[in-house]
Image (cartoon, helix red, strand yellow):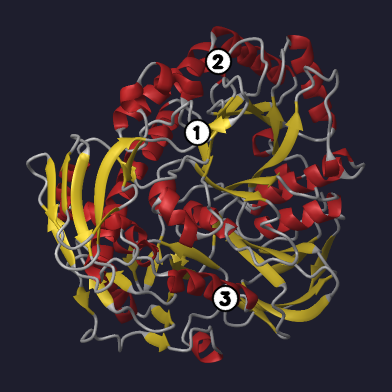
Amino acid sequence: MPTLNEVWANLKNPPSQYSTTVTWGWDGNMTREVIARDLDKLYSVGFRAVTIEPGYGMAGKYLSEAWFQSIKTAVEEAKKRGMHIWIIDEGKYPSGFAGGKFSEERPDLKMKALTGGRPIHTTAGQVTDQTLTPDVLSAIAVNPADKTEQNIDISSGKLHFVSPPGNWDIYIAQHQFRTSPTRSANNPTKGKDGSASLMDYLNPAATKQFLDWTEEQYKKYIGDEFGKTVLGFRGDEPAFSYTPWTTNLPEIFKAKKGYDITPYLATFSIPNPTPEQAKAKADYYDVWSDLFGENYFKQEGDWCKANGIEYIVHLDKDDNMGQFVRSGGDFFKDMKDLQIPGVDAIWHQIWSDTVSNFPKFASSVSHVYNKPRAFSETFAAYRPAPNDEQAKWVLNQEMVRGINIFELMFVPSSANSGQLRLRGYMAEDGFPTLVKYTNQVCYLLTQGRPATQVAFYMPTTSLFLGDMNANKSLIHVGEQLLDSQHDFDFVSDQALSTDLKLTKGAFVTAGGTAYTTVVLPAISVIAQPVLDKLKAFAAQGGHVVFIGGTPALISDKTVLNGKPATTADFSWATVEPSGDVTSSAISKMSASDVKLATANPMVKYIHRVTKDADIYFFFNESVKDETNTQATLKGDGIINEWNPTTNELTMQNGKAANGFIPVNLNLKPQETKFIIISKTKMKPL
């Protein structure tokens, strides 16, 4: 929590540790001369940090002695220039195969999957006998016509089933080594395949082995520069393409949930599971999400913290929670114990004609768990590539949603071409100005703490149940909140039930952010501990708003044994059954810190506070229309207006009343401005 003067003194030339970074792809023999030439070029266009991505045809294999020597050279050359380095923790992507070492040296720690395969079709009177391998876990027969089922006892190691009348499908669950596809710098085909298996992310022994092969080796070569020239490691899309499995999972599950999951495992492959089976699967997803967070991400974050560096990661399918839960589980559990949570903006996911609020997934974790920064890898696979103006729009769209550190894609190394090739928007004359602009805005949006007042519930358990209406509501309600200038942070079950402190009608983060309103989208299930906390929150004066109705199921330790919510009392909350953020629903929320005299859904903002100032960052997302209106902002003091594009600083007159102050908000199309309400008059940079 610095003072505004302390922040302002650094803003003209923000510390280089805050610099936007660029993905620097290494291909070919990265000699000292090539490394020096590349760094000089990247420095000349404004970068003060780079992120190294291993490539093909290098002098030595990824993770070989030659590789680490090249990294050491890069650190030496970056240090000479006052630049910083992030290192992608894998030989391409996704993180977790250690360049093929798990396949080559530790096959026992390779990724495992729970699989079903094709069902066995049988008819009336047909006898099915099979001797099973030890990896078969359970079996069930289903009559698809009348939906009747029969569990099949396989405890003898054999499957024996005599089909009753009708047609039957026998589903078998088994575990096996099976990896998501990987693209390895050590793969001679340069293909994306299964030859370099990922690790078993759910097994802490596998994570320790991964760290021993990677981060521990980097430490040997460049340890003195950890936290100095080398800022940390960046993970890339660790995820599952199949339902995860790990050693002793049934025992772990029973300890956490209190019942045996084994009889239900075969039902995970059934096209139309019963409600009971869907609930058991939701419990299963909750357990493997615990293991993914505890045994992989937390270990990565803890290692980096212990060694004075930071860990950044973004995940696969992190633009849509309905899809994400199948590959990544619980986003908050994955991200909460590492230093810098992130997202990945690719394939025009963020563009002026697209609603894309998913950067808030990462920034919300950073806000809830008191982490100064939230990350985005941006512009991978943008086709066509943006020009500088379009790139600036995308970056502003993310910054106003809480992102404050970027890795811009992609600059291939010059080892084979003889020169560093800047492509697309990076080759334009205005690009150095864009980098400087982004560095300044990101620095300012890192200072102090967020002042978000609205917590928006993440319906992860409902998504585990397959409730895609919850995902549609999450997207729709989030859009309406932002369009009506109600900025928010997503919050999880764990945050509400355990991690946030409930005091005086607010859920308070460790950093002091106080949520006085909790909004819930349409959900099918809610945990009893969360419900209890929300009720206590409302009793203290907090505002709870259910958009789209109340949940049908209340779970506790398990979803399987959840209770119908038919008799539950929700009179302490506001329920808006329409599914929209109506004016009536808004009237039941705490007062927004930004109110526009003229409604405009294109105006977005983010609010942070320092010791002595309120900092508002506004963005007009329209590419064609100006906005000229009066706004009322929470705060009291001198109104300073700073334009980060022109560097113009002006003052406004306004007198506060009841903690709010009127300001004139004039924004050209695509323009950003800071409104800073402070106790003292600011000086031009």
Left or right of 197 in this view: 625? right
Residue 105's disc is none
Q: Nearer the viewer, mark 1 or mark 3?
A: 1
In the visual, does 364 lie left or right of 417?
A: left
**Label 3 is placed on what type of residue?**
Leu
Whether residue 515 is visible, yes or no, is: no
Residue lying at 73% horizontally and 60% vertically, measured from the top left: 351
Q: What residue would you read off at disc 1?
A: 95
Q: How crowded is mark 1: few (under 14 residues within 10 Å), some or many (20 or more)?
A: many
Q: Quadrant of residue 430?
A: top right
Where does label 3 land, which residue? 481
Residue depicted at 79% across the width and 70% down the height:
622
Looking at the rendered structure, the secondary structure element under dot 3 is helix
Q: How far apart are marks 3 and 2 (CA)?
A: 46 Å
Q: Position of residue 559 (x, y in %)?
A: 23, 65
- The structure residue drawn at horizontal position 32% and vertical position 55%, both measured from the top left corner, is 269
Give whichever of discs 1 and 3 has the lower sequence position.
1
Q: Position of residue 228 (x, y in %)?
A: 59, 24
Image-based side of 572 in relation to 555, left or right: right
Residue type of the residue flagged with mark 2: Ile
Distance between mark 1 and mark 3 Cα atoms: 35 Å
Residue 366 vertical position relative to residue 271 in the rendered view, above or below: above
Is residue 273 visible in the rendered structure shown here?
yes
Separation (CA) of disc 2 from disc 1: 21 Å
Q: Residue at label 2?
A: 222
2 or 1: tag closer to the N-terminus: 1
Spot occupied by residue 2 in the image (x, y as percentages of width and height): 58, 49
